[in-house]
Amino acid sequence: MPFRDIVGHAPVLALVSRAIARGTLPPSLLLVGPDGVGKRTTAVAVAQALNCETPIRDVALPHGHRAEIDACGTCGACRRIARGEERLRAGEGAALDTFRVLAPDEKGSIKVDPVRDLVAAAGFRPLDGQRRVIVIDGAEALETGAQNALLKTLEEPPPGTVLLLIAARVDALLATVRSRCPELRFAPLAEREVAGLLAARCGLDPAEANAAAGVSGGSLTVALARRPGAVADAREIAHDVLAGLARGGPDDVRLDVASRLLVRAAPRTMAARGRGAAGKAGGRGAAAAAGGAGRKGAQADRQQVAARLDAMASLLRDLQVVGSGADRRWLANADLEASLTALRSAYDGPRIGRAFEAVDRARIALDRNVSPKAVAAWLAFNL
Ligand SMILES: [Zn+2]
């Protein structure tokens, strides 16, 4: 996606574009800012602007900013990069010579070996006239050894190569890494920008888009996980998992039940709602719907699982209310009172305490980049 189509961050985009136009782009950059605001989308735009066969000069950006150079978005190079990014997001990991991405593994870390492989691959010059953009998305997950393995390359990337480190936080990065990379700060998006993206790219109606944007903290990823339909979906899935695990059962059954936490919700498009099929599991995920807006699927999945765990905590609180005989007006999910009452015998006093603790720990693990899959598997045996 070219710079001109990215929502927000006009001053940052203008700065990067100017540097590309004048050949002064630093060989390594640190893109810092909250998840779901467009950092990776910007990395794609950089790769396209560097490789575009028919770049456009002096393009208007919002708020009076200008991009000195921008990708056309339609030539072979632009389309190859866009397709490559789509495949990466879909987990098909095709490596392009012009655009490579390294992301955290299943356990949420980036170890030294994949970094060494990347550094070795970067040693080969890109094909004639091409520029290679290497993205490390989730750089805060780089283990110390992996960061050290990168230092040399950050200092002096191979000719024709630009390294973009993407991070939500920089406190996990070594001072030696930070000192080698100029930082580009990405602020949270304005609520109206999130609402606009939800309406334009995810088909939400204005009221729904505004409501979700209002609790998004400026992140499209969070907005997608918190939109009204998603909250209802999250609660339904949380309830199913609690009910499924209430019965106990063999390991494979428990794992199967807990894996429902990972099912991708379908985007709530106008068409889907028209058919009454909104928000059900399956098909292209919310992550895919958000793809054009710069979210990697993994992060969307993480937000989705987080929303389901929050719904689970809310249901556990209600199970306590039901069990204590307190006034039903305290129930957050009063419409589910009958099924909560049925579940209550399985989640008695001590077990509910353990379940609360398990959900809390799972939330913390998710925030620390442990993979949603590992979190779900752990919950299968601790709820
Ligand atoms: Zn192009």
Image: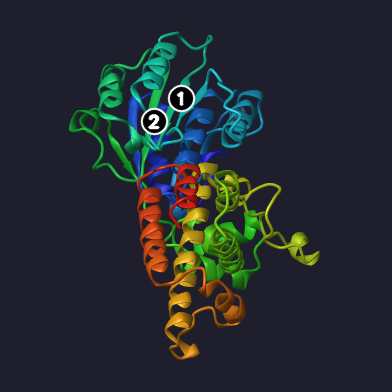
Confirm or reject: label 1 Cβ below 8 Å from ligand 1: no
Residue furthest right as drawn:
275
Could you say which is closer to the camera, residue 44 or residue 119? 119
Image quarter in which the N terminus is found: top right
Q: From the viewer's perspective, is residue 319 above or below residue 362?
A: below
Marks 2 and 1: in contact by CB < 8 Å? yes
- Give residue 125's position: percent from left, percent from top: 45, 9
Q: CA distance from mark 1 to mark 2?
A: 7 Å
Q: Residue at x 64, y 29 (%)?
A: 79
Q: Residue at x 62, y 61 (%)?
A: 199
Indicate left or right for 2 with 321 as reference.
right
Could you say which is closer to the camera, residue 102 or residue 28? 102
Q: Residues within 10 Å of mark 2 (few under 14, many from 20)?
A: many
Label 2 belongs to which residue?
Answer: 164
Q: Residue at x 44, y 55 (%)?
A: 63
Q: From the viewer's perspective, is residue 16 above or below residue 378?
A: above
Q: From the viewer's perspective, is residue 78 above or below residue 352?
A: above
Q: Is residue 193 visible?
A: no
- Give residue 219's position: percent from left, percent from top: 45, 56
Kind of residue indicated by mark 1: Val
Label 1 belongs to which residue?
Answer: 133
Residue furthest left as drawn:
175
- Give residue 321's position: percent from left, percent from top: 44, 81
Q: Earlier in the sequence, mark 1 or mark 2?
A: 1
